[in-house]
């Protein structure tokens, strides 16, 4: 399973890249608005210098020609840019046109398996069902992941299911078990996945025992 980081924060991306676990990056207008200080193009260019994996850049336009204009512009920034297009009738048209032009797309704001099926047929290379936002309205976001993964596998569709809107480590485990090809995680969830209280306790204990053994050796009481 591939792990992407869901952020526009360069330092967060650099940190996870150093861990050797980073397969790509997803951004959206909200994530970009959080950082400020540089243009979206500059941020995207910097991210593509850090990772050779797919980097999703989201269009803002709601009409097909506008989406195509923005997407073609993003695609020129680097070879690993993937144009993120929201699910809609115009979004599907844009995805089909991008596919014909050889530009990869990530269909975003997917909340049902049927939306994902349509995006796959239109030619999206990534399908992004939003797990957390469905959970927020008292639905089970993981059901969409499971259904969409099954549909993609049964019909051998040439696309990948990317579990998005991940809120906590359990979402990652469940998405992996459901067969999601990718999950995109906030930096905080990466950090939460690293930590376990028994790991922290074990490190402290091993250090204490090591110091005790060395001290005993130094005073001639060691075995
Ligand atoms: C990523 O592609 C999505 O835009 C993102 O995961 C949405 O997450 P949120 O629901 O926490 O805003």
Image (cartoon, rainbow, N blue to C red):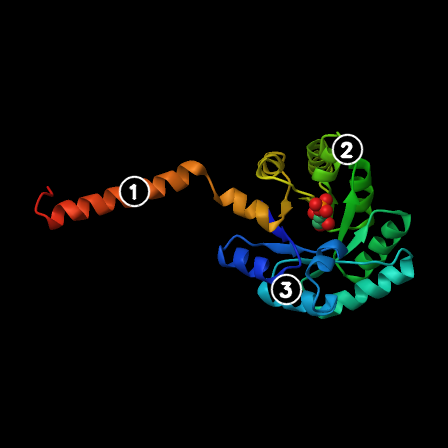
- Frontmost of labels 1 and 3 is 1
Residue 158 seen by the camera:
no
Label 2 neighbourhood size at 10 Å, few (<14), some (14-19), many (20+)? few
Q: Secondary structure at mark 2?
A: loop
Q: Position of residue 19 (x, y in %)?
A: 49, 55
Residue 30 seen by the camera:
yes
Disc 1: residue Cβ within 8 A of ligand 1's nearest atom:
no
Disc number placed over residue 181 in the picture, else none: none
Label 1 neighbourhood size at 10 Å, few (<14), some (14-19), many (20+)? few
Image: 179 above or below 61 = above
Q: Which residue is mark 2?
A: 137
Report the Cα–Cα distance between label 1 and label 3: 38 Å
Report the Cα–Cα distance between label 3 and label 2: 33 Å
Q: Position of residue 3 (x, y in %)?
A: 59, 49
Q: Which residue is mark 3?
A: 47
Q: Position of residue 128 (x, y in %)?
A: 73, 45
């Amino acid at each position: 399973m591939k792990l992407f980081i869901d952020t526009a924060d360069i330092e967060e991306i650099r940190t996870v890249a150093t861990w050797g676990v980073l397969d790509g990056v997803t951004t959206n207008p909200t994530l970009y608005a959080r950082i400020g200080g540089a243009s979206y193009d500059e941020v995207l260019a910097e991210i593509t210098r850090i990772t050779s994996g797919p980097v999703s850049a989201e269009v803002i336009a709601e009409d097909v020609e506008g989406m195509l204009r923005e997407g073609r512009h993003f695609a020129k920034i680097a070879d690993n840019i993937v144009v993120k297009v929201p699910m809609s009738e115009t979004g599907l048209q844009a995805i089909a046109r991008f596919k014909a032009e050889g530009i990869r797309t990530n269909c975003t704001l997917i909340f049902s398996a049927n939306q994902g099926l349509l995006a796959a047929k239109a030619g999206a290379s990534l399908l992004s069902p939003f797990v957390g936002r469905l959970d927020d309205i008292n639905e089970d976001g993981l059901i969409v992941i499971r259904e969409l993964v099954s549909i993609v596998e049964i019909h051998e569709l040439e696309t990948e299911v990317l579990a998005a809107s991940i809120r906590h480590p359990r979402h990652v485990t469940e998405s992996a078990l459901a067969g999601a090809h990718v999950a995109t995680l906030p930096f905080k969830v990466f950090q939460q996945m690293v930590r376990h209280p028994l790991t922290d306790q074990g490190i402290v204990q091993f250090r204490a025992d090591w110091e005790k053994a060395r001290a005993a050796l130094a005073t001639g009481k060691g075995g």
